Image: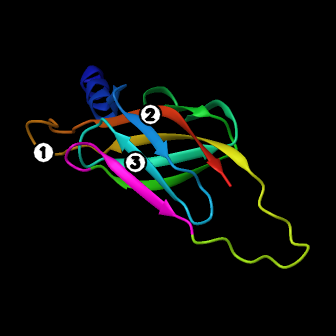
């Protein structure tokens, strides 16, 4: 009986990792410009979360079977990017408005390099046969891509 419960727990907690996803950023985050962020290479209907930090390093969320490790350091910001399409792609375009007129003596924005990394998370499929009875949690962590801000 204990073995059956342990096997059931492992089936529920099974994580499928894929190293075939990638992140690319074109353009820059400047006033009046468009920055395009593209994530691709994983299955459809997965939530893509984008992380950004000023520093490279290691950040781990969770532990054991539930651990996801990023190659960017804290402090970092995590933003939902969207859901992948049937091909496993998710694209986000950000257009900043023209630069505002700053009052005399106001500080100008400081330029910085952001390191970005994305994670795709697929929730368990509870249907048969592809996900089995309990399905599995699937994750894919992308490469680190850089973007210049201002």
Q: Viewer-nearest of labels 3 and 1?
A: 3
Asked if marks 1 and 2 touch (Cβ < 8 Å), the reply is no
- Which SS class for mark 1? loop
Left or right of 14 on screen, residue 65: right
The picture quadrant where one finds residue 59 is top right
- Which SS class for mark 3? strand
Expressed as whole percent of the image width and height from the top left, the position of residue 120 reads: 38, 42
Residue at image coords 62%, 64%: 31
Expressed as whole percent of the image width and height from the top left, the position of residue 26 reads: 48, 46
Which is nearer the N-term, disc 2 or disc 3? Answer: 3
Left or right of 130 on screen, residue 113: right
Marks counted in the figure total 3
Q: Gap in Å between the C-alphas at discs 2 and 3?
A: 10 Å
Which is nearer the N-term, disc 1 or disc 2? Answer: 1
Q: Residue furthest right?
A: 105
Q: Which residue is mark 1?
A: 127
Q: Is residue 23 magenta?
A: no
Q: Is residue 88 above or below residue 1?
A: below
Q: Which residue is mark 2?
A: 142
Instruction: Give the magenta part as a residue range.
Output: 85-96
Q: Which residue is mark 3?
A: 48
Left or right of 18 on screen, residue 94: right
Quarter the C terminus occupies: bottom right
């Amino acid at each position: 009986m204990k073995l059956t419960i342990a096997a059931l727990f492992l089936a529920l907690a099974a994580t499928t990792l894929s190293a075939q996803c990638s992140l690319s950023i074109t353009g820059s985050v400047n006033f009046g410009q468009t920055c395009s962020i593209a994530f691709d290479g994983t299955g459809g209907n997965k939530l893509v979360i984008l992380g950004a930090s000023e520093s490279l390093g290691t950040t781990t969320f969770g532990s054991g079977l539930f651990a996801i490790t990023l190659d960017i350091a804290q402090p970092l910001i995590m933003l939902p990017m969207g859901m992948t399409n049937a091909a496993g792609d998710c694209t986000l375009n950000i257009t900043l408005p023209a630069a505002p007129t700053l009052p005399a003596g106001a500080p100008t924005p400081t330029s910085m390099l952001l390191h970005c990394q994305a994670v795709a998370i697929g929730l368990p499929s509870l249907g048969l046969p592809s996900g089995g009875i309990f399905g599995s949690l699937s994750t894919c962590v992308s490469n680190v891509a850089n973007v210049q801000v201002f």
